[in-house]
Image: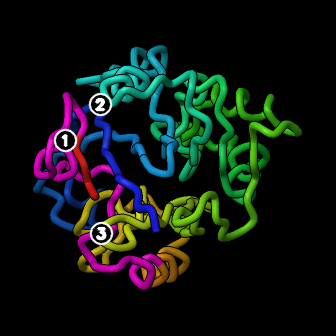
Amino acid sequence: MEFYQIFACRYAGPFTRPEAFLLWLGDFDKTEHIYYFIWLIRGRGEDIVVDAGVGPALAAERELGGYVNPAVALARLGVKADRVRRVILTHLHWDHMDGCSLFPGATFYVQQKEYDFWQKSPLLDNPVLASLAARPALDHLAGLEGTDRLVLLNGEKKILPGLSCIPAPGHTPGLQAVAVETEKGRAVLGSDCGHVFQNYSEPRPSCLIFDLPAWFRSFDRLKSLASSPDLIFPGHDKRMAEEYPQVTEDVTRLA
C-alpha cells in the first residue's frame, strides 16, 4: 500500500483561551495557547487539503493575530491553491471553511447533515450560532450545489484508497474526521472533535459542543480507528506547531 504524509499548516495564532473552554469546565483561571490550522494530506500523486481556513477579508475583520493566507502556507509546500482538486471540510465553523474561495478548482466534501444545518436551520437566527458561521463562504458553497464541485456525504465515505471521511458529530451536527493510512499506521485528523490532545487522552470535550452524547460516541469511534492514541490529531493544539518536525515556515509534518 502507498502511504500518505500529513502536514499541519498554521495560518493564525497563537491565541489565548481559558482551560475551561478547551476542557469541559476545567480550571477557569488557567489559560492555554492554541493555533488555527489547515492540513495537507500528500500521497498517490495528489495533495488533498483538509479545511479551508480563513480568507484575508474575514481575517482582517476578526483581527486574527499571526495570520497567514492559507494559500501562502500551502505554497510553502509547493502546493498552488488554484490547482488543488479536493478539499475535505471537517465542519462549517468560520475558522475551518471561510477560505473556500481560495480553491477555485476544488471539489469540496462535507457531510449532508452538517451542510443542511448551517444552510437551513432556523436556529441560525440566534446570534450565538450566527457568530460561528461565515455567511459569504456558506453562500459560496451554496452556489456550487448541483455541480460536481460539492459532494454531500451521508456517512462514512472512502475518498481515495487509504483515505476516508468518518462522521464524528458532537462539536457540530455533522462534523467529520479523516482517516489516513500513513507509515506510522492509521492516523485520524479529528479536527474539533477535540480542540487539543487532552480532549482525546482523558476523554473530555471542549465546552463548544452541540451534542454531548454524540461527542462521546464519536470519541469511541475515532479511538477505535487510530492505530495508536498518538495518531489522533486535534483541531487547535499548539503542539502540532511547536513539537513536530518543521518542514518549512508555519508547516510541520505530523505523520
Is residue 95 shown left or right of residue 115? left
Q: Earlier in the sequence, mark 1 or mark 3?
A: 1
What span is in magenta? 222-251
The front one of 231 and 36 is 231
The residue positioned 38% from the left and 77% from the top of the image is 226
Tell me the residue that label 2 is attached to.
Answer: 12
Image spot of residue 6 (x, y percent): 35, 52
| Helix, strand or loop at mark 2 | strand
Q: CA distance from mark 1 to mark 3?
A: 25 Å
The residue positioned 31% from the left and 75% from the top of the image is 204
In this view, 86 is above or below 231: above
Residue 24 visible? The answer is no
Is residue 153 shown left or right of residue 36? right
User: Furthest residue to the right?
Assistant: 146
Mark 2 or 3: in front is 3
Mark 1 or 3: in front is 3
Other-residue count near label 3 (Cα within 10 Å), few / some / many at <14 / 14–19 / ≥20: many
Residue 191 falls in image quadrant: bottom left
Tell me the residue that label 1 is attached to.
Answer: 16
| Helix, strand or loop at mark 1 | strand
- Specify the amino acid type for callout 1: Thr
Is residue 211 shown left or right of residue 137? left
The front one of 90 and 28 is 90
Instruction: Identify the mark at residue 231; answer none if there is no mark.
Output: 3
In this view, 150 is above or below 19: above
The residue positioned 43% from the left and 23% from the top of the image is 71
Other-residue count near label 2 (Cα within 10 Å), few / some / many at <14 / 14–19 / ≥20: many
Residue 151 visible? The answer is yes
Scheme by which the image is coloured: rainbow
